[in-house]
Amino acid sequence: MTKQWIDAYVNHPKTAVIVESEDELSHAVVLNYLYENLIGDSHNPLVTIASEDKKTIGVEKIRHLKKQLSLQANGSLDKISRMIVIEQAQRMTEEAQNALLKLIEELPDRTIICLAADQSANLLPTVSSRCFQLRVLPIEKNIAIDFALVNSIKKSEAEKLYAISSGHPGLFMSLVMDNTSDVTVSIGEAKKFLTSTIFERQKIIQVLVKEPDTIPMYLRSLRTIALAGLRTSNESSKKRWGETLTQIAMTEKQLSANVPTKLALLRLSVSI
């Protein structure tokens, strides 16, 4: 189904597109496919916009993008030759999204704009309603297992990896291929946190506090593992994983409310 949506957009790339997935690796897989099928020319590089502070994307970045796009695109008149990707588009401020609105209403010639977001609902309705919405659905389990088997992964291990990945295609592929991407590494570190003693967790927290930019991904990785546990565990364990998800959500809420990072993480470490 996801492939059908992607190909439908490739055949008629007349609007901006939202690539929706909680898994950043799945964003990358889809965006690479779009680039190869719409442009596929090394002379026309992918232009990426992201938040430098890992918190927001401000209006100045969108204004700078407008200036860049005021220049004429290279290439033939009938082919897309510029692809702009806004990573974690949900981090755009309201002012930035309003500034982007005029761009996506009238895309510059031979240009597409891709918004990679966790959920399109986290964007302004005025923005999301003007975009082709491409939701990356979980990969079917039998297809995932077959992919793992071809890559010399035992079926029992493949099923574990499928559960951990929540079926997200990018993350599953990365785990199967033992990719050392940030997300895959974060999943491994999150598993270590969950299986550590409370004393050992304090040491992990000391490291996290010194690297605050890594904490949002760390919490997403904890949530991914907890969701996998909720789906695959027996009834007696489901309550524990459900409570873990609740505590992770509470920690994210506290951090967004500027509760001291160490305090929020310490509370999490003793509550799960």
Image (cartoon, rainbow, N blue to C red):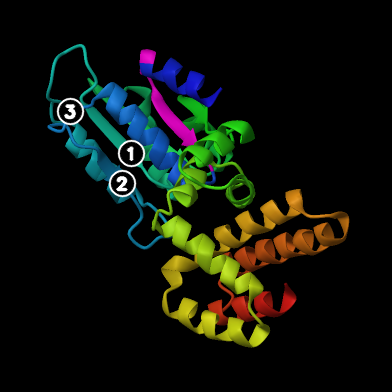
Which part of the image, by quadrant, shows the N terminus? top right
State whether residue 186 appears in this view.
yes
- Which image quadrant for residue 62? top left
Looking at the picture, which amino acid does disc 3 mark? Answer: Asp
Q: Which residue is drawn at 54% across and 37% down?
A: 120
Work out how far the residue at label 3 is from the one at label 1, CA to CA, in angstroms. 16 Å
Disc 1, SS: strand
Q: Is residue 154 left or right of residue 25?
A: right
- 10 Å crowding of disc 3: few (<14), some (14-19), many (20+): some
Rendered location of residue 164, percent (x, y) = 61, 52
Magenta stretch bounds: 11-21
Mark 2 element type: strand
Identify the mark nearer the N-term, 3 or 1: 3
Distance from Cα at disc 1 to Cα at disc 2: 6 Å
Q: Nearer the viewer, mark 3 or mark 1?
A: 3
- Judging by the rendered image, the residue that carries numbered circle 1 is 85
Q: Earlier in the sequence, mark 1 or mark 2?
A: 2
Residue drawn where x is 83% and y is 55% of the image: 234
- Left/right placement of residue 222 relative to residue 36 reads right
Name the quarter where the C terminus is drawn: bottom right
Task: Tell me: residue 115, above or below residue 222.
Answer: above
Q: Is mark 3 on a helix, strand or loop?
A: loop
Q: Which of marks 2 and 3 is nearer the N terminus?
A: 3
Asked if labels 2 and 1 touch by Cβ distance under 8 angstroms, the answer is: yes
Residue bearing the label numbered 2: 49
Q: Residue 41 carries which label?
A: 3
Frontmost of labels 2 and 3 is 3
Q: In which quarter of the image is residue 85?
A: top left
Query: Residue 205, position in %: x, y?
Result: 54, 80
Q: Do the residues labelled 3 and 1 touch (CB within 8 Å)?
A: no
